[in-house]
Image (tube, rainbow, N blue to C red):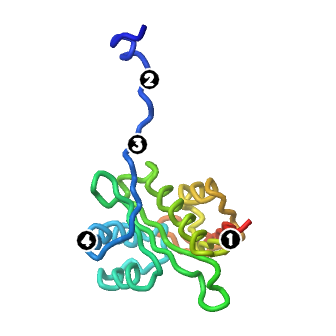
Amino acid sequence: MHTPADAAHEPLPESRPATVVREAREDDWPSIWPIVEEVVRAADTFAYDPAMTEVDARAAWLAAPERVVVAVRDGAVVGTANMYPNRPGPGSHVASGSIMVDRAVRGTGAGRALVEDMIGWAGGQGYAAIQFNAVVDTNASAVHLYESLGFVTLGVAPGAFRHPELGDVGLRIMWRELRA
């Protein structure tokens, strides 16, 4: 028989707050911008101009992509992703995108939820694969996440990214097939 005293000595099941990925709305921008701003200003994982203005960031993040989503936990936006064809015309059968997660929740599954959503969306749209063109080689958590979801590194452009602390580091091209 299980007693309350027994329960006090049993390990608690691992619990993470539920992350819901949904389409972004115009009124999400005030919650998306701080995430994008922090990532862009840090200049250590994305090849965006660290001096990018909010107006330019909004245009780049919301206007051009085919799809923009947010990751939400307990009613708060904790991450965002945009998705689009990797190239126009003959290259439009391969998807690409960008994923950004609030620093406070990195490593808790929000990024995984966004990438899994992207994989499902791209497959559902008939894309043959997903290609990330510029994964900073020193962004070990992103590389590990992508590899755990079936992405492979096709190659590394050595020294193609100027890291603010580490100097010139490589940029990976990462790929995941979607069609069997």
- Nearer mark to the viewer, of 4 and 1: 4
- What type is the residue that disc 2 sits on? Pro
Q: Which element carries disc 4, helix, strand or loop?
A: helix
Q: Which element carries disc 3, helix, strand or loop?
A: loop
Q: Is residue 14 above or below residue 46?
A: above
Q: Is residue 51 above or below residue 169?
A: below
Circles 1 and 3: CB atoms closer than 8 Å? no
Q: Is residue 116 visible?
A: yes
Q: Residue furthest right?
A: 180
User: What residue is pinned by disc 1?
Assistant: 156
Pick whichever, 108 or 143, lies toward us: 108
Locate residue 21, reporting x and y percent. 41, 61
Label annotation for residue 11: 2
CA separation in Å, label 1 and label 3: 34 Å
Q: Is residue 169 visible?
A: no
Label annotation for residue 30: 4
CA separation in Å, label 3 and label 2: 15 Å
- Nearer mark to the viewer, of 1 and 3: 3
Point out the image quarter for the C terminus. bottom right
- What type is the residue that disc 1 sits on? Val
User: Which badge, 2 or 4, comes first in the chain's sequence?
Assistant: 2
Label annotation for residue 18: none
- Nearer mark to the viewer, of 2 and 1: 2
Locate residue 4, reporting x and y percent. 33, 13
